[in-house]
Amino acid sequence: MKRRNFINAAALAGLGLTFTSFELLPERKKIRGTFSSNKNKVSIYTNAPVKPTRIFHITDTHLSIDDERGVKYQEFSKRMAGAYKSNSHFQTEVEYSTKENFEQTLELAKEQAIDFLALTGDIFSFPSEAAVEWVLQKLNDTGIPFAYVAGNHDWHYEGMKGSSQKLRETWTEKHLKPMYQQNSPLYAAYDFNGIRFVCIDNSTFEIQSEQLDFFKSQVKSGSPLILLMHIPLFMPGRTMGYGCANPKWGEKTDKNFEVERREKWRKGGHTKVTFEFYDEVFTAPNLLTILAGHTHRPAIDFKNGIPQIVSGHNATAYFTDLIINSLAN
């Protein structure tokens, strides 16, 4: 599918499951139909009249490509630049670099004529201009439409002064901006084959009021939605990696702020807006699924019949192969 056919609308090897099949709740069947998974492959059937669409969900590649423009930031990029140097391929266990694994994933997407690429953050280990340029070139070379939402590492130079929100704003504008295809970095929507891909940047673990309003407007549209975020939404029994709208998120549970050299999570925990967003997501009648990353571990959870798919890290070439089909066709 060529990029000209892509309409920009606005601005499980390793799951612990060999096969899962789940009939969604009867009251949600207006749009949601059935769901099944097998290793890193997922099939979702919807009652909406959408075109068959195959998606590669890619997250957490952690590329550390850099050049002379990044020399002045090396005191902030040093730790993450040294991470993920060699990674065992999730299927073959052969050692590859993150660049090689990302390239292999895109090459497979091209060979198999994948319709859409959903990138949910930490594609970069730090906001390198060289890495952004390299990734954009690779994505454009595939000719496959894509949507990107940032992860917490994408915009973070460790140890640099400033709040998470301010640093995200600064380095999105300076280096990451081309990834957004002229859309808002905080929220955007992309229509493709009758499906609306909604991007919400929750890479600070929280949701802003304008993002909540945007998501509400997408639900009101009635279109079948797929929600793209980096941080998974809270699920009981999961780790703090599922930190967006987690009731325990806050200063007392922040174990990594010293290692990552960043501000500590808020003492008072999440805002009301973040919790309201959580409720809106899991009561949305037209939401097909949530795609997220961050934890580096593939997993699927359900809440109110809505599946949240967390993909393994693409540093190991992992991707989720997601197929959307219509029961109405």
Image (tube, helix red, strand yellow):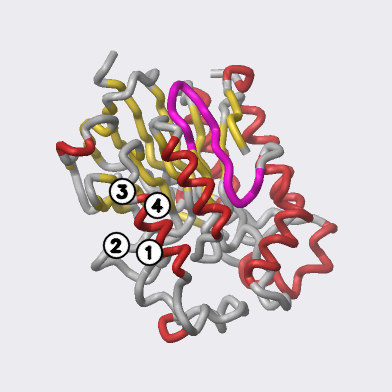
**Which mark identifies residue 282?**
none
Residues at discs 2 and 1 in contact (Cβ within 8 Å): yes
Who's the residue at 35% across and 56% down the image? Answer: 279
Q: Hey, which quadrant is residue 305 in on the image?
A: top left
Picture disc at residue 312: 4
Q: Position of residue 71 (x, y in %)?
A: 82, 65
Q: Position of residue 112 (x, y in %)?
A: 45, 23
**Residue extent of the magenta highlight:** 184-197
Q: Nearer the viewer, mark 1 or mark 3?
A: 3
On the image, the x and y values in percent for residue 249 come to 41, 75
Residue 150 percent across, percent down from the top left: 58, 53
Q: Is residue 190 inside the magenta stretch?
A: yes
Residue that numbered label 1 is attached to: 242
Label disc, if present, on residue 235 of the rendered structure: 2
SS type, badge 4: loop
Sequence order check, earlier mark of 1 and 3 = 1
Q: CA distance from mark 2 to mark 4?
A: 17 Å
Amino acid type of the residue tagged 3 in the rendering: Thr
